[in-house]
Image (tube, helix red, strand yellow):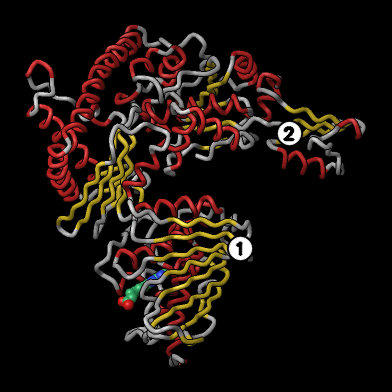
Amino acid sequence: MINNNNSNYNAVNINVLKGLEAVRKRPAMYIGDVSARGLHHLVNEVVDNSIDEALGGYNDIIDITINKDGSVSVEDAGRGIPVDIHPIEKRSALEVVMTVLHAGGKFDKNSYKVSGGLHGVGVSVVNALSEWCKVEVKRDGVLYFQEYERGFPKAPVREIGKTKKNESGTKVTFMPDNEIFKITKFRFETLAERMRELAYLNKEVTISIEDKIENRKEEYHFKGGIKEFVAFLDENRKPLHKPVYIEGERDETPLEIAFEYTDAYAENIHTYVNNINTIEGGTHLVGFKTALTRTFNNYAFKNKLVKDNKKITLTGDDFREGLTAIISVKVMEPQFEGQTKTKLGNSEVKSIVETIVGEKLAEYLEENPAVAKKIIEKGLRAAEAREAARKARDLIRRKNALDSMHLPGKLADCSINDPEHCEIYIVEGDSAGGSAKQGRDRRFQAILPIKGKILNVEKAKINKVLENTEIKSMISAIGAGVGIDFDADKSRYGKVIIMTDADVDGSHIRTLLLTFIYRHMKELIAQGKVYIAQPPLYKIKKGKEESYAFDEAERDTILKRMGIKSIKTERGEVDDSQVRGLTISRYKGLGEMNPQQLWDTTMNPDTRTLLQVDLEGIETEKIFETLMGDQVEPRRAFIEKNAKYANLDI
Ligand code: 0RA
């Protein structure tokens, strides 16, 4: 039994209390927000500590469990949090780690921890935001235990049993506090997705995740690491060669890169720093791009793979067409910049990556001339298409220059000019477009109807994309250019809202539109300017009372509120003939709503619900690729599986 000096214990507790209070008062400062995202971040925070143990070579197993009571356990086979009495704090180090902010790092200077950002805030933050938390530590043959309530220890650390010799590890179980979080239910998929990503990035670990409420379990272990990650991302594309793998270390900065070229046109580079997805890129990405362009150009020149024997310099873009890559670096003191603090700022990392990739890639190309030739040829074809695209863009630009009022004929623009307060609805079909034009508030709402299925930009060359009528009208309406010329700050609207029918076709069209914006106006999404309108699925009318429901569950809740129960037919549909004066209509499309209804349910800023589209989640790529790629089977399977949930979770 560890005996804390009691008076000391109380004195120290005053400081602890202050720290925990700060976290509970402003949780968003520590975990980003208190929505589902912040909630899941709690698990990631604990897992990060277990991963740190793995990076140090002390751990290779992490087990995550969503327990029956809704709490979560994270167990690892690391060294176990130290339990000896802390010389200054005069109490168990375990208690210090669990209750003092940022205490975790004090012990372990030489690890690739993350400073700033949302990660690396420490397990004490998880503890502070939990209704209760329990920790078990296996060390030196002893099982230690401590329990907390809202971060505050219930009793000193105690021994509760023995363990096998040489067995060590930590198990943290916590119940998120419903006084803090809006939602306290963990979603298996959200956790599993991150665990799979971590397993790809850290090939030495095996991560299991079990949901005891929904009886599901997954286990992730990828011997091939990020090489397998690349193959996974390209599941629905056709690779031109086996993944290239580069590994190296300089100035205590280890680097791992895997990439392959496919028959696709888009570029899919995902970068990580200390296992964090750096969505905004940064110096590691710049170093990689620079080395890639230079090395391929040198090789092409040396081996006379460019025409006419003269040195045509292919651009970086040419060598990134159809490229899927994972870049993973570990940086001791990372500086994160950018709007979402996901851009690596450390300038030294650029030259580290550039040097390693330059050397190793040149070596690879010498050893694999057939692959090298394929890639150079693909680059040359991309250069040709780039030239055609430049001409198409020039045409759009010239038209705009000649006539500054050159807006698409179908656009019903708004009357005020201030982009911040203006919004554009991109609406599927002319009839829905008509209703939207009549129903809107014309002062700040613009309507652009587009015809059915637009071009699938994932399958078309860039010059074809820019020749497409519907796409051209979107580009001119938004007025901020396209592709490398795109400047989100020039957008004529603060909100770009996609409004399609709530059916499978509508969801397909929405995906096509989102894919276009994602590939050619990405910054618009990054700035949070892209939204999805949520038209209702049902109208329920009983006497004079009228309600709208956005899904089946809401419909049933409304019916219940009206005192109507059990009117489901065998087909699961509501049979309205059984209740007098009740009509339930299911909207098949936006066109079925009159302008007033469309305004009330979907367009009025005071009553509508808009889904904001964000860039987060590696799954985005997979969703676009699954829906838009060449292969029909995965696409059909995906639509069948998800048709019920018309909303893409991006
Ligand atoms: C502080 C110091 C050491 C390890 C840890 C914390 C640690 C924390 C967590 C949280 C979950 N699992 C964990 N595993 C370890 C270093 C230990 C040493 O020097 O022996």
Cα gap from disc 1 to disc 2, whole angstroms: 32 Å
Eyeballing the image, is 422 above or below 62? Answer: above
Q: Amino acid at mark 1?
A: Gly
N-term mark: 1 or 2: 1
Instruction: Answer left or right for 18 relative to 269.
Output: right
Q: Quadrant of residue 395?
A: top left
Q: Position of residue 117 (x, y in %)?
A: 36, 55
Q: Position of residue 99 (x, y in %)?
A: 44, 74
Eyeballing the image, is 199 above or below 575? Answer: below
Residue drawn at 51 percent across, 16 percent down: 413
Callout 2: 10 Å neighbours few (<14), some, many (20+)?
Answer: many
Residue 7 appears in the picture as rendered: no
In the picture, the disc for residue 70 is 1
Query: The residue tagged with tag 2: helix, strand or loop?
Result: strand
The residue pinned by badge 2 equals: 548
Residue drawn at 53 percent across, 22 percent down: 426
Q: Position of residue 650 (x, y in %)?
A: 49, 39
Look at discs 1 and 2 and give the one toward the viewer: 1
Instruction: Answer left or right for 44 relative to 375.
Output: right
